[in-house]
Amino acid sequence: MIRISLDATARTRGMSSPTDSPSAPEPAPSTPPPAPEPAPSTPPPSPPSAEAPPPAAVIVTEGKRTEREIELQEELRSEREARIDRERRISELEDENFQLIKIPPAPPTPARRPPARRLTPVIRLEE
């Protein structure tokens, strides 16, 4: 500890210490680093549960449906089909309405023929 305090004092006064020089070799560690412990291959067993799981957890994990859930699912399916049919019918009526309201394009007007040349009699007088 005295050495550390001397090094710190020397740095504050602008002096160099033997540990500050780049050519000074580092002291070798006296003891080798400890070897890393191997990782456990299996996780430790969980403590046994003394209580039974709650009834709601049992129902969720088993995945059984009640009659009420089945009825609700069928009702939901029928409502979805009814909505899809209603939207399809609305689309068909909108298309039909558009076809009835749409102004038909004017029939093409025939191209006008240029007026025929007027033939004027040419009178030649022979002299």
Image: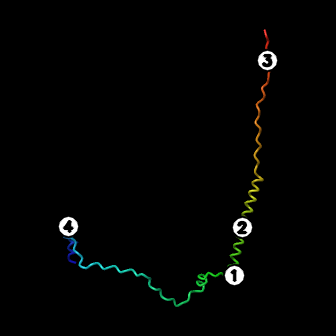
Q: Could you tell whether 114 is left or right of 17 in the image?
A: right
| Mark 3: secondary structure | loop
Numbered disc in front, either 3 or 2: 3
Amino acid carrying label 4: it is Ser
Q: Earlier in the sequence, mark 3 or mark 4?
A: 4
Amino acid carrying label 1: it is Glu
List the residue tagged with mark 3.
122
Name the spot of residue 80 as percent of width and height, x first. Answer: 70, 69
Real-space CA distance between mark 1 and mark 3, rounded to the nearest whole angstrom: 108 Å
List the residue tagged with mark 1.
67
Q: Residue at x 76, y 59 (%)?
A: 93
List the residue tagged with mark 2.
83
Q: Nearer the viewer, residue 122 or 93?
A: 122
Name the spot of residue 123 as percent of width and height, x first. Answer: 80, 15
Q: Earlier in the sequence, mark 3 or mark 2?
A: 2
In this view, 58 is above or below 100? below
Numbered disc in front, either 3 or 4: 3
Please tell me how crowded label 2 is: few (under 14), some (14-19), or many (20+) other residues with Cα within 10 Å.
Answer: few
Point out the residue furthest to the bottom here.
50
Real-space CA distance between mark 1 and mark 2, rounded to the nearest whole angstrom: 24 Å
Q: Residue 23's mark? A: 4
